[in-house]
Amino acid sequence: MIDVLLVDDQQLLRHSLAIIINAAPDMTVVGEAGDGSEAVTLARQLRPDVVLMDIRMPGQDGIVTTRQISQELTGTRVLVLTMFELDEYVYGALRAGASGFLLKDTNPDDLLAMVRRTHAGESLFAPAILTRLVEHYLATPRHQPPRPDGLTQREAEILTHIGRGLSNDEIATALTISVKTVKTHISRLLSKLAARDRAQLVIAAYELGLVTPRN
């Protein structure tokens, strides 16, 4: 059973999400919070598998809350809910440790699928949000650090595809290798780059200059 904590300042939305999630046979809502501080307290008490986190809340926002939960509870993954794909807080939440992002108008079946995949360790980005991340990097001057010495050519290729938003199956097809091999390389990338999850590998792909407007 996947334990889910709902965090949103809109009670009606929390109620709607709870109905959808509790109707699924493999997950349950273990708690609800209306602000960031309450969310941290409940997360410490309940230790949920997945937190559905609103990014814009009065008081302590979703970025600070995501950072606290991600740092303190390594077994808990945060899936951020945002109203707009151009939300300026998306990048901040990603850096804070969020494992994925979805829009609040996501249909119920996709929502449940994303909760399951987040719990399984995958990182998820609504296509429009991935586009937003690209735009952020295009608009923000930054220093590109050199590629880590221990990163092989194949690992760099896979990291590039991860940065472009490809799934494991799509990477395997693109590189003509097995999905099992892709997963092995991703495990090594996580270790070498000291990344918490796939979402942080997306950050690394951009920061290392492996994904640019030209490719």
Image (spheres, rainbow, N blue to C red):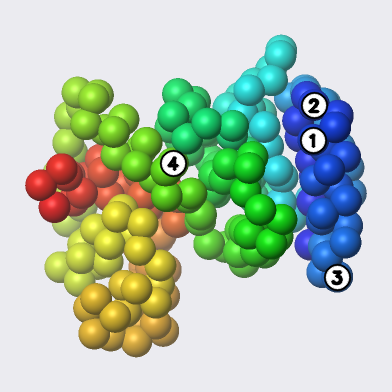
Residue type of the residue flagged with mark 4: Ile
- Residue 44: quarter of image: top right
| Labels 2 & 1 near each other (Cβ < 8 A) | yes
Placement of 55 over or under 174, stated as above or below: above
Residue picked out by circle 2: 10
Which mark is drawn over residue 25? 3
- Could you tell me which quadrant the N terminus lies in? bottom right
Residue picked out by circle 4: 129
Q: Is residue 137 visible?
A: yes
| Labels 4 & 2 near each other (Cβ < 8 A) | no
Which mark is drawn over residue 13? 1
* Spot occupied by residue 134 in the image (x, y as percentages of width and height): 29, 39
Q: Earlier in the sequence, mark 4 or mark 1?
A: 1
Residue type of the residue flagged with mark 2: Gln
Label 2 crowd bin: few (<14), some (14–19), many (20+), radius 10 Å: few
Q: How many marks?
A: 4
Label 1 crowd bin: few (<14), some (14–19), many (20+), radius 10 Å: some
Q: Dot 3: what SS?
A: loop
Residue type of the residue flagged with mark 3: Pro
Label 4 crowd bin: few (<14), some (14–19), many (20+), radius 10 Å: many
Q: Is residue 71 visible?
A: no
Marks 3 and 4, how far apart in space? 29 Å
Marks 2 and 3, how far apart in space? 25 Å
Residue type of the residue flagged with mark 1: Leu
